[in-house]
Amino acid sequence: GQNIDQPTEMTATEGAIVQINCTYQTSGFNGLFWYQQHAGEAPTFLSYNVLDGLEEKGRFSSFLSRSKGYSYLLLKELQMKDSASYLCAVDSGAGSYQLTFGKGTKLSVIP
Amino acid sequence: GAVVSQHPSWVICKSGTSVKIECRSLDFQATTMFWYRQFPKQSLMLMATSNEGSKATYEQGVEKDKFLINHASLTLSTLTVTSAHPEDSSFYICSARDLGEGLGSPLHFGNGTRLTVT
């Protein structure tokens, strides 16, 4: 089966850096996605990793280690608007292009 | 970028009635669309995969006779919640991938439909 784990909640201070971890065990692997979801809204795409290493996109970076089944999302210079849930999702290559989502990490940014 | 439009954004209905939710890919064709459900403070749960021109594939535990899916064209999928009950109240979100975006094409989500059954 597919298993994706990430912490349930995290709290960080405005202006700081926070790292949200994700570990996965899936039958196949075609890439890992990070999404941001504000309460009551649909998820929005943040990043995609398929090769090992760090992908940087502005204040957000995402890292992948395929051998360890591990990824993290790094958020720098935190802003209050970054308070949201962050979802880790894996494309296991099941053939129908669906993604399997983790349960999400609720990040609270405090002043 | 690819846009997925979902309608309505919210609906309130009485128990026992049916509700139809539409999902459209606006600037790309989607042979496959995905329907998710999300209860408060929980993760997205895949309900079914909608396939253009063929039957939908339902996840374990999802009643196919209750959640009717029709993928009539390459840009439109509909989810009908039949004989809705209060426990069906949830946030329903559709999504699709624009395979023209190449490797790593993300799932693009509609804005979701908040269903409340009274």
Image (spheres, rainbow, N blue to C red):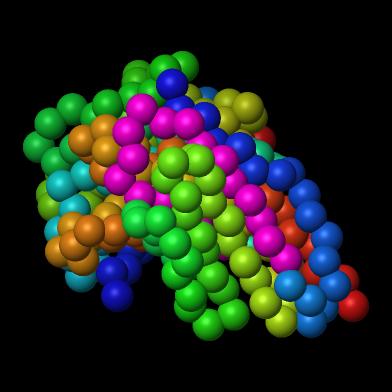
Name the spot of residue A31 as percent of width and height, x first: 35, 50
Instruction: Look at the image and give the residue range highlighted in magenta.
Output: A18-36
Query: Looking at the image, how many numbered discs can be counted on the residues?
Result: 0
Taken as a whole, is the magenta stretch helix, strand or loop?
A: strand
At horizontal 49% and vertical 40% (from top left) the residue drawn is: A69
Q: Is residue A97 visible?
A: yes
Instruction: Name above or below for residue B56 compared with residue B43.
Output: above
A70 relative to A97 in the view: left or right: right
Where, by quadrant of the figure, is residue B41 drawn? top right
At horizontal 47% and vertical 50% (from top left) the residue drawn is: A65
Name the spot of residue B36 as percent of width and height, x first: 45, 41
Q: Nearer the viewer, residue A56 or B82?
A: A56
User: Residue farthest to the front?
Assistant: A67
Q: Nearer the viewer, residue A31 or B34?
A: A31
Instruction: Name above or below for residue B65 compared with residue B53.
Output: above
Residue A35 inside the magenta-drawn segment? yes
Where, by quadrant of the figure, is residue B90 drawn? top right
Q: Nearer the viewer, residue B98 or A73?
A: A73
Name the spot of residue A80 as percent of width and height, x first: 77, 77
